[in-house]
Amino acid sequence: MNYVLAKRLAQGVLLAACALTLAACGRDESASDASAAFTPTPEQVAHGRYLARAADCAACHTAKDGAPFAGGVKLDSPYGTFYGSNITPDKDHGIGNWSAEDFYKALHDGNARGKHLYPSMPYTSYRQLTRADTDAIYAYLMTVQPVAVANHPHDLKFPYNLRFGMALWDMVFLKDALPDASTGKSADWQRGRYLANALGHCAECHTPRNVFGQLEDAKPLSGAALGRTVAPDITPAGLASRGWTGGDLQTFFSVGIAPQGSAFGEMYPVVHLSTQYLTKDDVRALSVYLLGDTPPTPQPVTPVAADAAMLAAGRSVYLAVCAGCHGLSGEGKPHVAVAMNGNSTLRQADPHNLLVAMLDGIDTQKFAGLEDMQAMPAFSSTLSDDELAQLANYLRATWGGQAANVTAQDVKALR
């Protein structure tokens, strides 16, 4: 049977079961009394502000040039387009009428006062948060400026636009936690586990999903494709294969730039809005968890054999359009462009992110302190598919230790 047809039939069966389940049971959710006593302390509000940053709430709930937490952020996915909601204390459009209990249920169960949320709001990870931490985040959000901005409805494909199906989805797929991608017992590993799996919800982007959108238990943090860029493998083995060390990870999370490159694509707002604000202890703990208490040895770039004529063609393109910023020997330039020599993106077996960066370019990046990177131009209109394939192969074989197997068709598919 055709895979796509089988997938659609399976989805139809699931949605039909959802309809029967809801018809038989009815909706017994009721809104909580938002007037229930909740008197936060200044310390709780301050802690909630820190946790909201650690949980990267602004990335999905604060639109570019929009008011803080007023929603409207566009989230593209294979299922359609989601939009971040208004989570200011506005009583008409935000969560001003919510109680702390309502807020906890939304983060723990995906139940927003009787409305089942889509897992684009990562309650599948946030359910690991302690009640004390959800109360602290709620306390902080209740102090931000209320903004009367209506929520933008999601634009999803059929059958994903049938929200009632989420009731059974939660019954079948909602779990307390995925298996750990690393091993350890230290205090740093335990804290990093909470930061990565609960607050930082790393699995939501870095773990592949099955046919119904649930995270794959067998492949935690092994990489996944959701948006324009692919979230890479951040298991200990995956990180080590691209040369990452614990110290480099700490620099990356704190500043946004490390010897392996800078945060770009969907990782840029993670650093810009979240990880740069973590304490040094939490940054260290996060890095320890990702690599484990006994980190694997970072692997050096291994030279690969490639066709000399193809590499010469790619080098010509590099010298013409790249070397001015990235250096003749791929050494990069501070505050201008990252190094190509040993760059983590070049060391990925899948050339997807490299090709997207060359086609789309990268906006100016402002990082912590004085660190920044100039804008990288898009080459989609100035270089042909053949030229971009030659350039990609030169970069991968010369400085990434990867096969020079990118074709013009690979480039064309991503235009």
Image (cartoon, grey):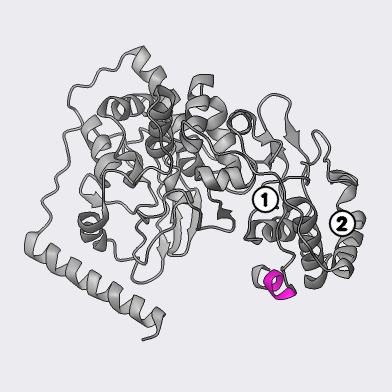
Residue where numbered disc 2 is placed? 318
Residue where numbered disc 1 is placed? 345
Counting residues from the start of the chain, the first of labels 2 and 1 encountered is: 2
Asked where in the image residue 17 lies, by quadrant, the reply is bottom left
Q: Position of residue 90 (x, y in %)?
A: 36, 35
- What secondary structure do most residues of the magenta stretch adopt? helix
Amino acid type, mark 2: Tyr
Instruction: Give the quarter of the figure containing the N terminus.
Output: bottom left
Please say whether residue 308 is visible from this viewpoint: yes
Residue at (66% x, 27% y) in the render: 368
Q: Position of residue 235 (x, y in %)?
A: 49, 45
Asked where in the image residue 3 lies, by quadrant, the reply is bottom left
Left or right, 383 with respect to 239, comes to right
Task: State whether residue 202 is above or below residue 41.
Answer: below
Q: Magenta residues, as a range? A: 408-412
Amino acid type, mark 1: Thr
Q: Nearer the viewer, residue 285 or 213?
A: 285
Asked if the stretch drawn in magenta spans residue 409, the answer is: yes
Left or right, 87 with respect to 164, comes to right
Please say whether residue 64 is visible from this viewpoint: no
Q: Position of residue 160 (x, y in %)?
A: 35, 66
Asked if the stretch drawn in magenta spans residue 150, the answer is: no
